[in-house]
Image (tube, helix red, strand yellow):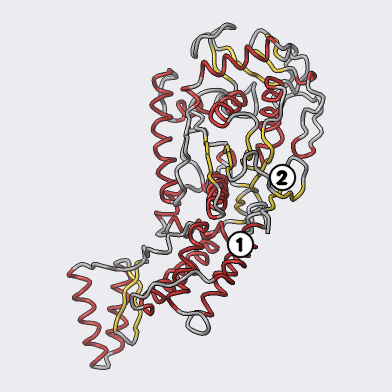
Amino acid sequence: MAIRLYNTLGLELQTFQPLEKGKVSMYHCGPTVYDYVHIGNLRSFYMADLLRRMFEFEGYEVKQVMNITDVGIGGDNDEGEDRIIRGLKREGKEVTLENMKELTEFYTEKFIGDTVKMNFLSPHVLPRASQHIEDDIRLIQELESKGFAYTTSNAVYFDTSRTPNYGKLGGIVQGDGASRIGTNEEKRNQKDFALWKFNTSLGYPSPWGQGFPGWHIECSVMSTKYLGQPFDIHTGGVDLAPIHHNNEIAQSEAACGCAYANYWMHNEFVNVGEAKMAKSEGNFITMRSIEEKGFSPLAYRYFLLTAHYRTPTNFSWEALESAENAYKRLKTLMQMFKKESDGKEGSVNKAYKQEFLEAIENDCNTPEALAVVWKLGKSAGDGLSYPDAHATLLDFDRVLGLKLSENEYEVTHVSRAVNDLLRDREAARMAKNFSKADEIRVRIEALGYNLKDTENGQELEKI
């Protein structure tokens, strides 16, 4: 079965045809590092990781690039305040380039830490916008020389009227309406966007004046510098398609005179209640929040796997708890399969692998893939040997990314105090003093453990 992906450029499922046989080039819009990323942001990076894992599972050689926006006009609204400057003001720091660097390095480190916790594969290239200022300037000069750019008192703008197919991504019809904070009378068209924004007190030198590159130009530069033009796949959140990605397409294709990217893939929002998760809405949840409540970061990955990437998903702590319970059961199954295998090496089951492939090749349908996982789990030991079940799920985990070979809930060492409580509880049970045994169970749970009574005795699991 061929890989089929939903291409926002055309609004349809399309059979994937790489530019170069056996190879895939992918660019993903990364974070603007002015704050902690929230778990809604992480869905976009999860989708990028899932896509890469799927292609590598299929035997493709992948080159993955994800940018870090650590400078520039960090948002769709060219007339608004830069997000990084907002971050400095939020933290009470003076607005200087040195402080901008310090702020963005801090949040870049935190972002990378979150991706490690979510078991994302490291992109092959993780370029920072601040390291590509000269590249931005060269691309703007190219656009200017071809008549696609013009200068006003506050910025160098891209002239969208020169590109008749502007807004082609997602079938969006671009009007000439005013910006969200008012009309800029110097613009030829109100939908024109900034390539370079002047700032007399802060920024980088350029042929047009001191300032910062536009957010859109940065992504065009970093994607094509490391992948060439055109490249295979560009991804991002669905909110980036109407403006940011259409602007990337317009300026990149104007400069090159060729296609920019062949496939555009967009993930839907993670909602809280009726609203999308966003810093501007004040309803964002970070990975720190998840860990502070005692959840595994990979339980959140499992939660994301339960919904198709193009379907909005509603987050709640109850939904995450349900996902973690399922994730724990899967880890327990893997432990049991390994134990029952008694050291025997298994083989990947071809029939189950074919079902799994059909799911992921159908536009990365992870809910269907998980259904195959649980179907396999139920058949293990009854028509499917434990060694083969174990080997097959480990193979699937190359795509799922759940670290099924490990179990973060397994207790390998406990304190002397917990051991003493376990001994006292066992003594109480032997004496049929069940009220005392229940009291000790509560004390053990207060120390961070779930307790199960099994045929082999008392077993602990981290909460």
* Above or below for 317 versus 223: below
The residue under label 1 is which amino acid type?
Answer: Leu
Q: Position of residue 27 (x, y in %)?
A: 57, 37
Mark 2 residue crowding within 10 angstroms, few (<14) / some (14–19) / many (20+): many
**Residue occupying the point 27% across, 89% down:** 429
Q: Which mark is residue 7?
A: 2
Q: What is the count of numbered marks? A: 2
Question: Relative to 356, does residue 337 appear above or below in the rendering?
Answer: below
Quarter holding the N terminus is bottom right
- Taking the spot 43% from the left edge, 29% from the top edge, the residue there is 104
Left or right of residue 66, residue 444 in this image = left
Who is closer to the viewer here, 38 or 215? 215
Q: Amino acid at mark 2?
A: Asn
Residue 357 numbered mark, or none: 1
Q: Secondary structure at mark 2?
A: strand
Q: Quadrant of the C terminus?
A: bottom left
In this rendering, position of residue 161 left or right of residue 15: right
